[in-house]
Image (cartoon, rainbow, N blue to C red):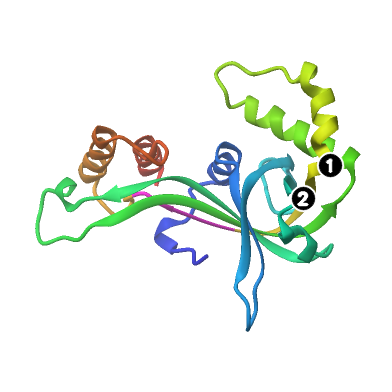
Amino acid sequence: MHEFPSYRAPSQHEVTHLVRSNPFALVVSGGGADEAPTATHTPVIIERLADGEALVGGELIGHIARKNPQWMSLRDGQPILLIFSGPHGYVSPTAYADDPNVPTWDYAAVHLTARVTVLDDPQASMHVVTRTVHELEALEPSAWDPTASLPTFERIVGGVVSFRFEITDQRAVFKLSQDKPADVRSRVASAARERGCGHGDVASLIERIGATS
């Protein structure tokens, strides 16, 4: 992903927060002269940060269905791409209050390059799926206790294959109308909130990032 200088992430905290808060990622592998890459949508969570809030040098974990053939094409150490999409939304020129102008799209996204390790073992997969449940339930207003369901997990965990991702590179874009004056950013955020942020709370992100840029 190309990182536009004007739209770089304002801090590592914001990058890590986006990954943690938007764990439904794209796992992309393969591709070449004669074939397209393969991609799977699946939850990917942070297992370990490298230092403070750094993703590079840290580890993420995830899993996919065993019936999904993507895992069979992966070899340990192979580079893959993890794509995390944050809040985003269309920006109409009506929010600018001047003409001529053009529409755009405000968004935040993080791409992580990683080396994958396939964890084709029920015990390892139990760790991955239970850690995933713990992380996702932490995002809920009232967390579910999975204790009573662990025997069910153990019975069906063979139906997934898990992965460890060692992060080697990070790219991020936070394009949130930073190139506009404060009054325009405020109108863009208000328009998104009035319309309804169908792809995450982009209005609050515009207000927060704009204020710190």
Question: Position of 167 compared to 41: left or right?
Answer: right
Q: Residues within 10 Å of mark 2 (few under 14, many from 20)?
A: some
Q: Which residues are magenta?
A: 171-176
Q: Is residue 127 visible?
A: no
> Where 154 falls versus 120 (above or below)?
above
Q: Which mark is residue 175?
A: none
For disc 1, the marked residue is: 158
Q: Residue furthest left?
A: 99
> Where 173 falls versus 46 (above or below)?
below
Marked residue nearer the N-terminal end (1 or 2): 2
Identify the residue at image location x=26%, y=44%.
Answer: 185
| In magenta stretch: residue 174 | yes
Per the model, the C-alpha gap separating discs 1 and 2 is: 8 Å
For disc 2, the marked residue is: 66
Q: Is residue 192 or residue 4 the one in the foreground?
A: 192
Identify the residue at image location x=25%, y=36%.
Answer: 195
Marks 1 and 2 in Cβ contact (< 8 Å)? yes
Question: Position of 186 compared to 197: left or right?
Answer: left
Secondary structure found at label 2: loop
Q: Position of residue 121 (x, y in %)?
A: 90, 46
